Amino acid sequence: MSKKRIIKFFSLALVLLLAVTALAGCGGGNDKKTETETQTQTQPVNLTVWWWGEQEAPGAQKWMDETVALYQKEHPNIKIKTVLQSTDQLVPAFKAAAAAKQGPDIQYFWGGVWTLEDAWAGSLVPLNDLIPAEEMKHYINNNERTFDGKQWGIGWYLSGNAIAYNKDLFNKAGLDPANPPKTWDEFIAACAKLKKAGITPVAAGVKDGWFGGWLWQLLNKQTLDSVDDIKKAAVGESKFTDEKYAQWWGKLKELKDKGYFNNDVASLDYQQGQDMWLQGKAAMVFGNDTFFPGWIKQMGVDKVGIMQVPVYGTGKMADTITVTAQGWGVTSWSKQQKEAANFLVFMHTPDRIKAWYDNTGVLPADDRFDASAVQLPQMKQMNEWYLTKPSLNMENFIPSMLEERGIFPGVQLLLSGEKNAKDAAALTEKAIKEWRSSNPAALEKFKNWIGK
Amino acid sequence: MKGMNQATDLVSTGSTEKRAERKLTDRYQALLFLAPAVLVIVSVFLYPVVKLVQYSLQVQDYGQWKWVGLANYRGLLNDDIFRQAAKNNAILLLCVPILVILSIFFAILLYEKIRGWQAYRSIVFLPYLLAIPVVGIVFSYIFQYNGILNEILRSVGLGRLALDWLADSKLALPTVMVVIIWKELGFGVILFLSRLLSVPEELYEAAKLDGASWWQTHWNITIPQLRGIIQFYSIVAVITMISWVFNYVYVMTKGGPGTSTMVSELYIYQQGFRFNLMGTASAVGVILLIVTSIVIFLQFKVRGGLDSDTE
């Protein structure tokens, strides 16, 4: 090869490299330009949706496929790709996408901090300019995703917590299925009767941690007045070892010591614990109402009862039903933010809201839903509680580090008999202190979040 | 004659120039051929390492990166969960000698063609072919408090030994270690067996003639012959225990109960992808990289020493 040819080759390679770099620059670095501009009807638009929900609301996949097909039919220039994430994948996959500023246009989010942490990280756009206020006001639980006066996400369907019980096993133990326990003392008495009859009173699994979070929010909220109480403890205005925050550990210990959980509670995952109840191996389960329609279908409508978590506390949240709206956000790097928001609005059209309920049996997060369509008595009851005594899910108002390092391990170690209530409370206080010292920026956000 | 000399001079000057030009061309050609590989190495390895180090010296303040120097590293030293993770990785290193010894033992048994050795060879190697998440899920069921293992123990009257293998913080890590050994053993056995098959038969025949016992034969012939493979496999196993156990832990225990099975990789995952603390996660990544590099360096050092001994 002659020197001239080599120089020619290098020159050509350089030109190509520059061209590729320039093209890459155009593709990746122009994220502010025309972000919110609506593209014309003729321009092809590709939307990517990362979602979750089939796991807790079976039928969601079918509804999603239908919805996408209908929307694409109405908007032939728009192609929507949906990716169903696993439970473990949902959060880390989005964090990785956010780090690279590449990924979905629309992302599924749980409420509260699960949405806002990513909003604070600059990964989401406020939806106020993309969805008309007149439309948005119909979405339920918007307050979970509001910060700084902006709406960072919207709800899709409702997810609430109650205890499901097996009426046959109640009968077998001599309990009245029409009058489930309402207070903690009644609950303990019922558990004693069930155990005496050779029935495991409560099915649960805490090995993967998630159920620990549920127990915490359902029991700890009873001594609190609002989610602000928990935010105050998070920022250090009070302590998780204070009686108000630590009392629930004693209740959990009581259940453990009296043998009211399945003996393998510490070695089962949350789903396995729920399955155990479904198989008739335990009388009660702390459940999520998104599962209720499926369970009722499997066990029979007359076999399943639902009850509120028995009350022991005197806080304003004691006699309430936790409800959250699982929902959506639009990413800051999306080039089609307006189109993405339009698709979210389409999900809330009357036809789609009805179709959602028809497919899943789960209540949609939209006040335009005609509740007279609800047939199952258990879901009617849930809907009535939502309207009369709702409270927010406290798990959505704490830093994830508190959950991972304090609550999950605390519940595991207490239920495996390795920690007492006092130690478990101390573990949560330690976890929140670690969060405060390692995450001062988030701490500031939490301080600003109190009272709003 | 003069003319001829001049001509020769011209020719020689010309050929010298040509040689010089050719040398230059060769050099460019060499560079040209090397360029893609260099580009790949720089973009695939060097760039991420530089970025990793850079992130480890910064914190992400909601979309903005801020320089904090060594604060992330100092934070790690004060974090007892990180210390627990590092300690657990160190405990996992106990698997290495067990793996080496068991692998050699099984390789020798297979080499000696015990009855049914072909079937055993496949059985021993099979776990290595299985995906770690599959192995993790299966063993999670086996080790449940009411799982198969405990049911068997209870059915044969050994109910006192039926423990909560993965839900007791004292037992969980040893249980995970058992699974790691079960899964990783096959690779070692096949490695050692391959080497054994290339050892000259005469060595064993001579030992036999000399009346060497089974133990003497393997101690004096097999082990020295396997020395290079032992080093290689040990290093691979050490690296596995330091930075390749995430899947086992994540699937079987998620670091619990409590933080009893937390390992550095899971710590990185939690910091980066649960707590949004990419700076801290990167700092642990740098530490892991340094530790692994030291291990690899030692391997080369030891191998170099051994090679020169052999020469």
Image: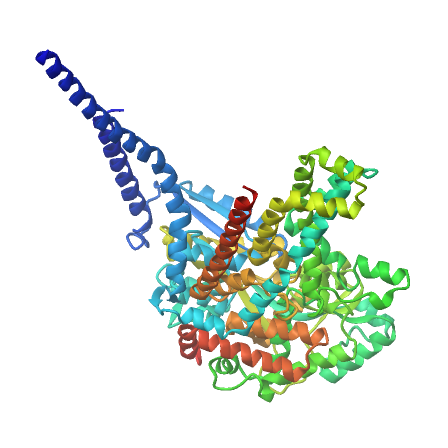
Image coords of residue B265 (percent x, y): 54, 60
Image coords of residue B73 (percent x, y): 44, 69
Residue at figure coordinates x 72%, y 65% from the top left: A267
Q: Is residue A379 left or right of residue A429?
A: right
Q: Is residue A81 left or right of residue A210?
A: left
Which quadrant is the C terminus of chain A positioned in? bottom left
A140 w.r.t. B139: above or below = below
* Closer to the camera in the image, A349 or B107: B107
* Closer to the camera in the image, B96 or B132: B96
Quarter residue B282 falls in: bottom left
Which quadrant is the N terminus of chain A positioned in? top left
Quarter residue A405 falls in: bottom right
Quarter residue B251 falls in: bottom right
* Closer to the camera in the image, A99 or B56: B56
Q: Say how the picture is coloured.
A: rainbow
Image coords of residue A95 (percent x, y): 46, 59
* Closer to the camera in the image, A263 or A438: A438
Evaluate whether residue B114 shows in this view.
Answer: yes
Residue at figure coordinates x 78%, y 48% from the top left: B215
Image coords of residue A46 (percent x, y): 41, 44
A257 w.r.t. B270: above or below = below
Residue at figure coordinates x 49%, y 75% from the top left: B78
Q: Is residue B279 left or right of residue B27?
A: right
A239 w.r.t. B257: above or below = below
